[in-house]
Image: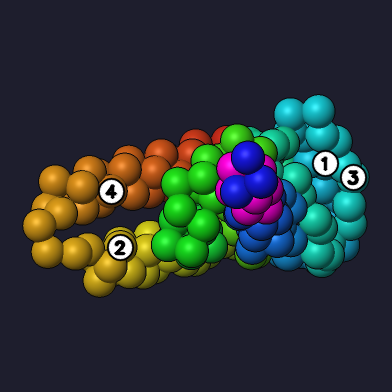
Amino acid sequence: MISKLLERLVLAAGLASLSACASIVSDNDSTTYISTEPEEARCELHGQDFKRVVNTPTSITLPADAAPITVACNAEGFQTTTAELDTSMDGWIVGNIIFGGLIGFAIDAARGAGQKFPPQIALVLDPESFDSNADLEAWYTRRRAELEKKWSRAMDEAKSRCARGQAELCNKRQANLEKARDEELEALERKRDNAQVGS
């Protein structure tokens, strides 16, 4: 009778420790640094039961359960620029599977922990108007080159992380990156077409 009681107490303590471990190892919040060009833009953040207004540059703590979060930044003389922040699993989840077992993983997944926003986001605001067509073309040519470089770097990094035997997964990841790149470049071209010259 006493031995059975002890067994139950030990089991309960073990489950409690796993729960505590899962909560300590992964946090439900993460911090994102938001910067803009130009600086001192006003950014509105909207997510699930979440709303904040900040001035850049700044760091802000974001709850995982607010994802996805839309960021809309504006500054005088510039067009409003928007982006979407979403979460992804962080490395601590793997640690919970190893050290906490399936119970630790289940606890984190249930409470939204282990889901992290990107550590930083940089937004470029396009001018509302340009002094000349030459200025307009120079601005958007530079922006396109920057975006192409950014996506090329992202694709190279994704390729470097591909493991053997995961060709299908890697190809899908590359296809998603290419789609996102094309969408962003198309959006940039629409801005170029709608850009104004003169006041």
Q: The residue under label 1 is which amino acid type?
A: Glu
* Circles 4 and 2: CB atoms closer than 8 Å: yes
Dominant SS of magenta comes to helix
Considering only vertical position in the picture, is 79 above or below 142?
above
Q: CA distance from mark 4 to mark 1?
A: 30 Å
Q: Which residue was labeled with disc 4?
A: 173
Give the secondary structure at mark 2.
helix
Q: Decide: few, some or many residues near mark 2? Use Cα within 10 Å; few <14, some 14-19, many ≥20.
A: some
Sequence order check, earlier mark of 4 and 2:
2
Whether label 4 touches label 3, CB < 8 Å:
no
Regarding residue 134, the answer to whether it shows in the image is: no
For badge 3, the amino acid type reads Val
Q: Earlier in the sequence, mark 3 or mark 2?
A: 3
Q: Which mark is residue 59?
A: none
Report the disc number at residue 53: 3
The crowd level at tag 4 (other Cα within 10 Å; few <14, some 14-19, many 20+) is some
Q: Is residue 76 magenta?
A: no
Image quadrant for the N terminus?
top right
Q: Is residue 166 left or right of residue 90?
A: left
